[in-house]
Image: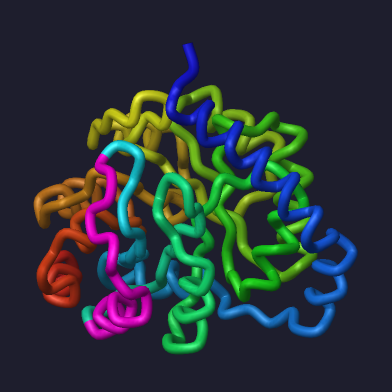
Amino acid sequence: MNTILDTIVASKKNELVNKKKRVSINDLISKTESDNRSRNFVSSVKKIGKNRPAIIAEFKRGSPSLGKICPNLAALHQVKLYEQGGAAAVSVLTDKEFFFAESNDINDVFHHTQLPILRKEFIIDEYQIYESRVLRSDCILLIMSILSAKKAAILADLAHKLNMDVLAEVHSVDELKYVRNEVECDLIGINNRNLKTFETSESKTLELAQHIDDKSLIVAESGLKTQQSIKILWDNGIRIFLIGEALIKSEAPDETIKSFISLY
C-alpha cells in the first residue's frame, strides 16, 4: 500500500518530466552561472542560536495531513511578520500539488527580506538543485527517506558547488548513520513527523539527538507549537527550530515568534 510520501514522490517524478520538457537542464545551468551569491544560511542560524532559539519560520498554505490551512495567504506579508518577530531564517515550501505553493512565492520572499532562505521541496534529481540556485535559495532540504545514500551525497555535493548549504532530514537512527557517514551536509534536521504516516511525536528529536555529539548541527522540525516544547529541546542542547503550522495558524505570527525566543 502506497504511503502519502510515495504518492508525493511519484507526483514529483511526473512533474520533473514536464519541467525538463519546458526548460532544459542546460538552460538552468547557464542561469546559475550569472548569480552564485548566497546569504550564508547555516552561519546565520548558528550565530543566532548561540544566544537564543534560532527560528526557521516556514511559509506554506497547507499540507497533505491538514489540507488548505490558509489558501489565500500571501508570502510577502507573512514573511515580513516573520522578520519583524525575530526569525533567523525563512523556509518556503515550493510544492504546488500537496502544499499549495504558488510559482512566485520564493521570488517574493527573496526580494522583500534579507533573511536567508531554505527551499523546502522533495528533491530527488540534480535538476532541482540547479532550479533551487536559480530561485535564489541559500539552503536546500534533502529528505533521507526518499533518497539512497549515494544519491543524497551526489545532490549535496552539487548544492555545495553552487554555493548552497544542505539540510539533511532524518527520522530514524539508520538514516542518521548514513547521513553522518556518506553525506556532506551542513545541518541535520530531525523531523518529529513520520512522512510515511504524517503522525508526529515531539520525542523524536530528543531520541535521535543522543546520537549526535555536536548539537549545534541539529534542527528540530515539526510539531513545535509551544514555549514548553522549545524550552525542553533548548535545555537539551538544541538551538535551531523549524516551525510552520504554529505560525501559519497564528493571527500574529510575529508575536508567536517573539514568545518562542522571549525566555532567552
Residue at the spot 48% in from the left edge and 36% down from the top edge: 170
- Residue 108 vertical position relative to residue 224 in the rendered view, above or below: below
Q: Is residue 193 left or right of residue 6?
A: left
Residue at the spot 45% in from the left edge and 79% down from the top edge: 109
Residue at the spot 53% in from the left edge and 68% down from the top edge: 103
The answer to whether residue 145 is magenta is: no
Image quarter for residue 203? top left
- Residue 177 vertical position relative to residue 131 in the rendered view, above or below: above
Q: Is residue 178 left or right of residue 90?
A: right
Question: Residue 236 versus residue 65: which sits nearer the camera?
Answer: 65
Q: Position of residue 137 (x, y in %)?
A: 59, 70
The answer to whether residue 68 is magenta is: yes
Magenta region: 66-84
Image quarter for residue 89? bottom left
The colour scheme of the drawn protein is rainbow
Q: Position of residue 163 (x, y in %)?
A: 71, 70
- Residue 109 vertical position relative to residue 227 in the rendered view, above or below: below
- Residue 91 vertical position relative to residue 2 in the rendered view, above or below: below
Question: Residue 55 versus residue 10: which sits nearer the camera?
Answer: 10
Residue 239 seen in the figure: no
Q: Position of residue 167 (x, y in %)?
A: 54, 53
Q: Is residue 126 left or right of residue 108?
A: right
Image quarter for residue 197? top left
Considering every residue shown, the one lying at the far top of the view is 1
Residue 17 seen in the figure: yes
